[in-house]
Amino acid sequence: MTEPVHVIGGGLAGSEAAWQIAQSGVPVMLHEMRPARMTEAHKGQGLAELVCSNSFRSDDSDSNAVGLIHHEMRQLGSLIMACGDRHQVPAGSALAVDRDGFSDAVTAALEAHPRVTIARGEMAGLPPEEWDNVIIATGPLTSPALAEGIRGLTGETSLAFFDAIAPIVHRESVDMETAWFQSRYDKAGPGGTGADYLNCPMDKAQYHAFVEALLAAEKTEFKEWERDTPYFDGCLPIEVMAERGVETLRHGPMKPVGLTNPHDPTVKPYAIVQLRQDNKLGTLFNMVGFQTKLKHGEQGRIFRMIPGLENAEFARLGGIHRNTYLNSPRLLDGRLRLKMRRSLRFAGQITGCEGYVESAAVGLLAGLFASRERLGRELALPPSTTALGALLNHITGGHIETIDAGPRSYQPMNINFGLFPPVTEAPRDESGKRLRGSEKAHARKRMITARAKQDLAGWIAAQNLRPAALPDAAE
């Protein structure tokens, strides 16, 4: 008799992982602590409960990275996508769902599956060592006992904190007629060249206008259950720094020292915003020291006041909120196993992905890896050119590890085109002329998605992945 795989957590990631395991012919025990122990955010006891928005975001698989991962998950028989499709509500080009109908459908499908057993009750600490194949998919609201067990095992100092995240910008959207590459005092540093930062200069009037906008902008409020959690590593929001005095930022993350503007060497900038490479591909750059609790609309408006970022496209905006996630690139291997205890896998938001769809996608991969391992077969990694492969690569090693940033330079991320290997072919129109501006950017996105769909189809065929149809219980 085949021993079951244990999945801890009945959210989107855990539900998807359990489904993939069961569909692979392997029994699975799905552990969900609700209703025996509730969280601060969940209201019911259904599996895959949506606690925030009911939107899965864009469903455009040709020019949107989220839509592309929708497509890839559908190709692999995703339970989450099937139930979302069957319970969608009008939302334009986005996929939004009836949250109760969706959760009920996921719950019904798993309860009806002959190879799924659902166990209600809290996992008070790490799983027993005799469980040799486990997926932990407990999300940002992991129970204190389990979180403490993970901390003790991994040596991480903390898993629950205010996660201070700076905005991340697509490199190609930065105006290089204004910005330039240079490190302070041209210092190369470990693995650097002396020109490792993008620098955006401000004169005095621009700086003061920027600070005034920060102080006047709308900020988000912490939820009641977040208010007593300390800031991560003492990271202050940039607007809080600005409140301490108009010149504070010039002596902090925006100090103009050690840099010379090659576009106008005779003029010394009054302040400088620096952006540091955020992924190995060099397609994403984060705004150094710009963690913020500004509302998202305000961030786009205010940060585009910065010279060189007038047309910036953001892969993600900044935020500060309670989160629980691993330093996955250091702790997990390429198949999401904990390096120090390979019987444990992690999936969903606890790995450092963000968003409903991304969490479910990582659960899907974890389920495939775990079931194939149980069957004595190793599943090849999905190509990095696919959305699934790009997201997995970010989680397990696509970030930049630097001496000054240390292990916590890794930040949660939604799927976006900056995580994909760039296309090398220059986009052209029908006459063969190279495209420019927005037409070029749009064409590149379509080239990335076309490549991804082709490569995913090849991977599915090579790995003999044949997803089964959704049962009637999910209707």
Image: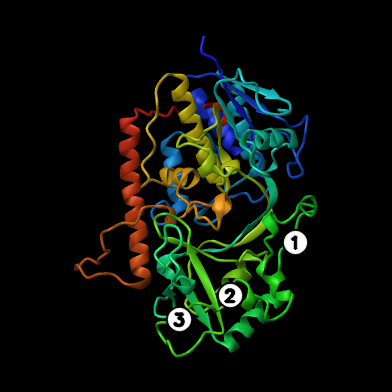
Q: Amino acid at mark 1?
A: Glu
Which of the marked residues, 1 or 3, is nearer the chain's N terminus?
1
Q: Label 1, label 3: how many angstroms apart (C-alpha)?
A: 39 Å
Q: Quadrant of residue 427?
A: bottom left
Q: Position of residue 168 (x, y in %)?
A: 52, 62
Query: Compared with residue 399, is residue 126 higher up or lower down, i.e. above or below?
Result: above
Q: Amino acid at mark 3?
A: Thr
Q: Does residue 148 appear left or right of residue 165 in this picture?
A: right
Q: Which residue is mark 1?
A: 221
Residue 254 marker:
2
Which of the marked residues, 3 or 2, is nearer the chain's N terminus?
2
Between 111 and 151, the residue placed more toward the observer is 151
Q: Amino acid at mark 2?
A: Met
Q: Quadrant of residue 431?
A: bottom left
Observer-side mark, 1 or 3, equals: 3
Q: Position of residue 348 (x, y in %)?
A: 57, 40
Residue 350 marker:
none
Label 3 SS: loop
Observer-side mark, 3 or 2, equals: 3
